[in-house]
Amino acid sequence: MIEYRIDRRSGVATYQQIVQQTKQALRLGLLQPGDKLPTAREVVEATAINPNTVLKAYRELEREGLVEPRPGLGTFVQRSLGNADAAGDAALRAELAAWVDRAFAVGLDREDVTALTTAVLDAREQRTSAPADQAGGGREGAR
Amino acid sequence: MNGEARVGDEGTTPEAAFAANGLGRRYRRRWALRDCAFAIPAGAVCGLVGPNGSGKSTLLTLGAGLRQPTAGEVRVHGLRPGLDPELRERIGFVAQDKPLYPRLTVAETLRFGRELNPRWDQELALQVVQQGRLPLTTRVGELSGGQRTRVALALALGKRPDVLLLDEPMSDLDPLSRHQLMGTLMGQAAEHGTTVVISTHILSELDGVIDHLLLVDGGQVRLAGPVEEILGAHLLLDGAEGLPLEPHTVLEVRHTGRGVSALVRPDGPVAEGWRAESPDLEQLLLAYLRSPEAAPLNTTVPSTPLEVAA
Amino acid sequence: MSSAVLATRETSAAPRSGLRPRGVTWLTWRQTRAALLVVTLGYAAALAYLLYQHHQFDVTTVRLRGLHCSTDTRDPVSVITANCNLAALAVMQAASGVHRLATVALAAPGLLGAVLAAQPLAVDLERGRHRLLWSQSVSPRRWFTQRMLLPAAILLVLSAVLSVALRWAVLWTHPALPIEDWSFDNASDALAPVYPLLTLAAFALGAVVGLLLHRVIAALGITLALYGVLLYGMAQVRPYLVPLHRKVVGPGDPWPSGDWVYDSGPVVHGKDFSYSACPVATGCDKEPSWILYHPLSQFGPMLWVETGMLAALTAGLVALAYRRLLALTR
């Protein structure tokens, strides 16, 4: 069964961390359709976070059609994630590994690599989701 | 339930697990609490914060029914704590100094809970105690402060209350115990819908734990409501000197080197030039505590009683 | 058929529930069992001492009679020989042993009220444990009642047994102990029915003081002090609890024996005087005396009046304790 690790200093909302970690597990095949997610009680006992946070995360996953609550039984995985099949996944992984090796070779360290991937992912997100919100616009101006 | 209808008559939210209306308490000539109004819904995990001597303990004492209000009323699930007998088994309370009988062993202390509480959950109480590896045959007087706290919490949790009022429960616990006990508390809230009110002055303790907030300062409620609503009602603005802050309600302005940082309750669009972001809980609470004159925000009751008092 | 099943269930469950204390009574039992054991042993020792002294009194009286010194055990002056003297002394010692026991027993209610009522209440309030107790599912009122009831009931039984035995030793056995020693002095409060009520009153007093003071040492001290005041006050009012009788006896006539002479003086020219203010120059020895006294027959009724007063005091103190308890939760 999946165990969530909550990082309170990450700046990512707690429920988002649960959503992301669940999706990660689905992508990596650690969770398969039919698997049961831990109950809210089990999660909060292990992580000492607010139960509503867990419920909110599960609702989010349910909204995305990934899990399905069965009353009295628990929340179950409905479909797996990762459109790439295992073979394609492995190919991508190998490519990434090679890229990381190159990055280290030119002198980047772990944090630099993470920062770089995050920046690329963020930039891509900016391109796909067109209108930035008001506050975001202000921030851009100040920079 | 007719008890809940009673609260409805008084104008508070019917489903509130812990509510106050015009609540005041005077000790001799000093008012420890005055004109407090709020309503915490059932199942909420509510942080009760405020500086030392702000009235947190008094509020919890009134909620637990150990004292009666001098003015106004306090209700737990619509009933009057300390007066309505059917409420006794539904409220759990742990006082700040965690009073226990030092001559009783840990096992006997749990027996104490079992003998005095009809809803007693021995399994849960034992689990809390054993999680801390406390030997059952040790006398409570020989335990450390943190271990005693664990026993006191085991007693309160084993009572299986609907509303759990905890006065600075975590202050003398080590980080592991704090995490374990907070987890157990949240587990109870998840499993049984227990309403938990935790007072503290360690703000980081509440991070990610609470969904409701009560800020008490100088005997008055200054913030009350769901955390998300309260945080959402504020913006932290960073910008150059001279940028307009109107028409927002300004809570605090701090001059930081070349610029200005202001915590505001936005009332309209933010002027060009400001960098706006949501404050986190700690920033917000500190700003309120630093600015005692900042207007209160209470989203749990229809109108703040301060308007009436003025 | 179902009723039969129920009946067998109840009988099988009965031995388990039995006398096992539950709820607040369990807590009280757990907290006071050691003290109550010591107290019970103390009362048992007092009772054993009483029976021993009473037996000694019987034995020494028989021995004294066998010497044919005198038939009057209450008149050791009539004893002449050394043997008789020693035998008479032994009788006296046995009698005064019982009297001494009664005097010592008088201190017990105050001590027990301080230790078993004032101290536990004060220490619970001083350490803030009332907040623990009153946040359980039991009301403060019920907690207080059950917390006090068990020790009070046990003290009532113990004090009743000892005081009935004392009264039996003093008044109801033959040969009786010399009653003058008991003539309405403080020791008589150790007799039934006064003593059990005195014990209850002191216990209630301790409870009130404990609830009022919240300080252990102060509560112990004040309870003992107030108990001393109570005993002193009882001694002051005791002569007036039943009406005094007055009679005049001639110069040579014997004074009432076994009665409690409260005051006396010479009668000169038909007027009462005190001996220190004798108006006759040659002294008042030849004059008749007036005597204010309680006849022995008044002894029993007077004890009952005292008992009634103590019962009223106890009731008042209990009411006060509950009022104080209510104030603590307001």
Image (tube, rainbow, N blue to C red):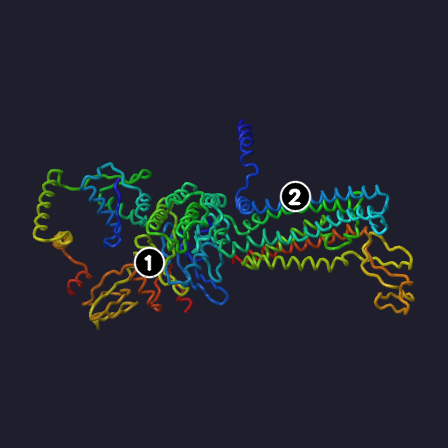
At mark 1, the secondary structure is helix
Packing grade of label 1 (10 A; few <14, some 14-19, many >=20) is some
- Residue type highlighted by circle 2: Ala
Quarter of the image for residue C220 reads bottom right
* Nearest the eye: C315 or B82: C315
Which residue, given by chain and number where applicable, does mark 1 sit on?
B203
Q: Is residue B257 left or right of residue B140?
A: left
Tag 1: residue type?
Leu
The residue at the far bottom in this view is B242
For the N terminus of chain C, the image quarter is top right
Where residue B92 appears, as percent x and y from the top left, is: 44, 50
What x and y, as percent, mark residue C245? 83, 57
Horizontal and vertical percent position of residue C12: 54, 31
Image position, residue B133 (x, y; %): 38, 44
Q: Which residue is mark 2?
A: C44
In which chain is the residue bearing label 2? C
Residue sitting nearer the eye, C127 or A8: C127
Q: Note whether C48 is above or below C117 in the view shown.
A: above
